[in-house]
Amino acid sequence: MPSMVFGECSTSTASRLFPMSLRKDAAILVRRLSLPRRSRASMVPLSSKTLAVGAAAPTSPPPSVAIEACAKVIDGKYIAKQIRDEISAEVSRMKEVIGVVPGLAVILVGDRKDSATYVRNKKKACESVGINSFEVHLPTDSKEEDVLKFISGFNDDPSVHGILVQLPLPSHMNEQSILNAVTIEKDVDGFHPLNIGRLAMRGREPLFVPCTPKGCIELLHRYGVGIKGKRAVVIGRSNIVGMPAALLLQREDATISIVHSRTQNPEEITREADIIIAAVGQANMVRGTWIKPGAVIIDVGINPVEVTCKLSHFTITSCVAHVLSIVQGQFA
Ligand SMILES: NC(=O)C1=CN([C@@H]2O[C@H](COP(=O)(O)OP(=O)(O)OC[C@H]3O[C@@H](n4cnc5c(N)ncnc54)[C@H](OP(=O)(O)O)[C@@H]3O)[C@@H](O)[C@H]2O)C=CC1
Ligand SMILES: Nc1nc(=O)c2c([nH]1)NC[C@@H]1CN(c3ccc(C(=O)N[C@@H](CCC(=O)O)C(=O)O)cc3)C=[N+]21
């Protein structure tokens, strides 16, 4: 998940934007994001005059010196490591004190490559912090009842504390009835309508909150970005990212606008924002001119883009995936 914060500088807003490309300057992005930042404190306050840019992909890259001078990057990779260490310690303590090892069950239906990768990453993440993981992989032509049977088994299994049904499901399955079948106490994705409903209601607490929006808020917190009273714009309104991100920001007392595919003049809305969370399945949508100087941006989008390399011009999924994995590692 790309997320960058650029400090105030004297260049124009657009020239402060960082290219999501593999051109010469992009190497700086990769290098910057890859550098270990051991010296950082756990909370990294940003100046109130901070411009953050993530989703934007300007037409021409700024001079690298300007990037070095202006850029402040939200180093999600560093924060992720911190969080993993904290969870690891918590899991050990849990084991020691109450003799329980948390367990996550993941149900994957079908053979989508991206879903298989996400599930594999979840398994690895569990292993790295001492959480047990259970995986069920069903063929694409499975029946809905097969999935429901596994959900029911996991609902009743005391060694399973969280159940995650990887989305999207094959089109012949009813996502709603499958997600409804996960008991809310084990609904780690926070996709059950009762959990989402509680998230939306004042004075109610969801048992779980969708992970990607929660990750965005966590980054803002850990970087000391104030949310209360700020104008926040969420681009995208999906059930799994945009909508819960907006609800979470609202719970933090931000004033929210949601931009979606039918929004007219979205740039007028984003230009007002102190905080932007971009969750759109479309690359290069947010331009430099859409952003108010000093805004903080978190981009959760994962979109393959065509980039120009020094030696050739081609659509590079693997190259981009490499850059994105480094960038998205910020949030992993
Ligand atoms: N890093 C992470 O943890 C995660 C990343 N992702 C990535 O985030 C992105 C969004 O994912 P997801 O929310 O599931 O996607 P969806 O396709 O479900 O939703 C995309 C949203 O973007 C809106 N949108 C599309 N085009 C435009 C446009 N031109 N202007 C304004 N809004 C637009 C849609 O509007 P409308 O509602 O009107 O159709 C919709 O609300 C994807 O790139 C996905 O891969 C997703 C999940 C987790
Ligand atoms: N039930 C369900 N829950 C989900 O949370 C869910 C889902 N279904 N379906 C698909 C989307 C997508 N999604 C992503 C989460 C993290 C990265 C992410 O951080 N990816 C990095 C991983 C980096 C790393 O592992 O180090 C990368 O791809 O490079 C991407 C995508 C969750 N989703």
Image (spheres, grey):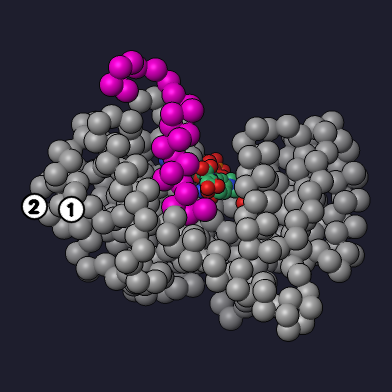
Q: In the displayed structure, does residue 207 sit left or right of residue 276? A: right
Q: Judge whether residue 324 is colored magenta.
A: yes
Residue 71 in view in this figure: yes
In this rendering, which labeled residue sits more in front, label 2 or label 1?
A: 1
Disc 1 crowd rating (10 Å Cα; few below 14, some 14-19, many 20+) is many
Look at 34% across and 60% down and name the residue there: 37
Q: Determine the image quadrant of residue 62.
A: top left
Looking at the rendered structure, the secondary structure element under dot 2 is: loop
Disc 2 crowd rating (10 Å Cα; few below 14, some 14-19, many 20+) is few
Residue 269 in view in this figure: no
Identity, as a three-letter code, of the amino acid under mark 1: Cys
The image position of residue 70, as x and y in percent, is 18, 53
Q: In the displayed structure, does residue 115 sit left or right of residue 328? A: right
Residue sitting farthest toward the bottom = 97
Look at 68% across and 64% down and name the residue there: 130
Q: Which residue is mark 1?
A: 70
Identity, as a three-letter code, of the amino acid under mark 2: Ser
Residue 104: assigned label: none
Look at 79% across and 78% down and name the residue there: 99
Say which label, 2 or 1, has the lower sequence index: 2
User: How far is the residue under mark 2 from the one under mark 1?
Assistant: 9 Å
Q: Which residues are magenta?
A: 309-332
The image position of residue 169, as x and y in percent, is 73, 40
Residue 10: assigned label: 2
